[in-house]
Amino acid sequence: MKITPVGAALEVTGSSFLLETESERFLVDCGLFQGGPDAEERNREFPFKPKEISAVFLTHAHLDHCGRLPLLQKQGFSGSIYTTAPTRDVAQFILLDAAKLQEEDAERESRKKLRAGETPVLPLYTEQDVVYTLSQFRPVIYEQAFSPAEDLQVTFRQSGHILGSAFLEFRQGDKTVVFSGDLGSPRRNVVPDPALPSTCDLVFCESTYGDRMHKSR
């Protein structure tokens, strides 16, 4: 198993990991880069061929984790997007809203460029692209391991971040790798407490707010 961070490594936003087995390639999350002058350019290109990705595993529906899924589909990805049913429902609203804003921004910017005799711009993706992408979502159930490929088991566990959020356990042979996604705090009375992972060999843990003391609840 080979794992390559594609975003949110030594930076925030654009969360994504490329996971490669001997025969297939997968993504954990496919987030949008936000802020900074180069975000737009980075969002338009992937450092791999989308059509070669067999499946995507989505931890939750925030834009920095799911925001480039329609672009992935638009550029050739045709596999399944595995996530919890609540995440699929929330992602529908997040992605449609993002597409609408991108279309409006592109239209506004294109009017300026046409007046200046320049080439108009295109949105990253449209609302129709989102509709196509949503048809690729496949709901999974917490704590029920499944095999998206030979000799690979995946389990979604409660991360307590937002509705439907999960951290993911990948088991291949005798090795287990955990991707934390975003983790919530316990005892919030809004979403369930985060579950505990199984014994594992490697953890990819997001730590955007890990450098500060958090108020006790």
Image (cartoon, helix red, strand yellow):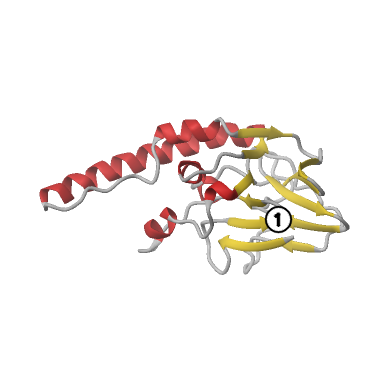
Q: Quadrant of the N terminus?
A: bottom right
Q: Residue 202: percent from the left, percent from the top? A: 77, 63
Q: Residue 193: percent from the left, percent from the top? A: 75, 45
Q: Is residue 97 left or right of 114 when viewed as pictured?
A: right
Q: Residue at x 62, y 69 (%)?
A: 211
Q: Is residue 130 left or right of 2 when viewed as pictured?
A: left
Taking depth in this image into account, of 33 and 79 the one nearest to the observer is 79
Disc 1 residue type (three-letter): Phe
Q: Residue 154: percent from the left, percent from the top? A: 77, 46
**Residue designated by label 1:** 179
Estimate how packed mark 1 is, as few (under 14), some (14 to 19) or many (20 or more) residues with alpha carbons within 10 Å: many
Taking depth in this image into account, of 54 and 36 the one nearest to the observer is 54
* Quarter of the rendering containing residue 58: top right
Q: Residue at x 20, y 51 (%)?
A: 119
Which SS class for mark 1? strand
Q: Residue at x 62, y 57 (%)?
A: 17
Query: Is residue 208 something that shows in the picture?
Result: no
Q: Residue at x 21, y 46 (%)?
A: 110
Q: Is residue 198 left or right of 120 when viewed as pictured?
A: right
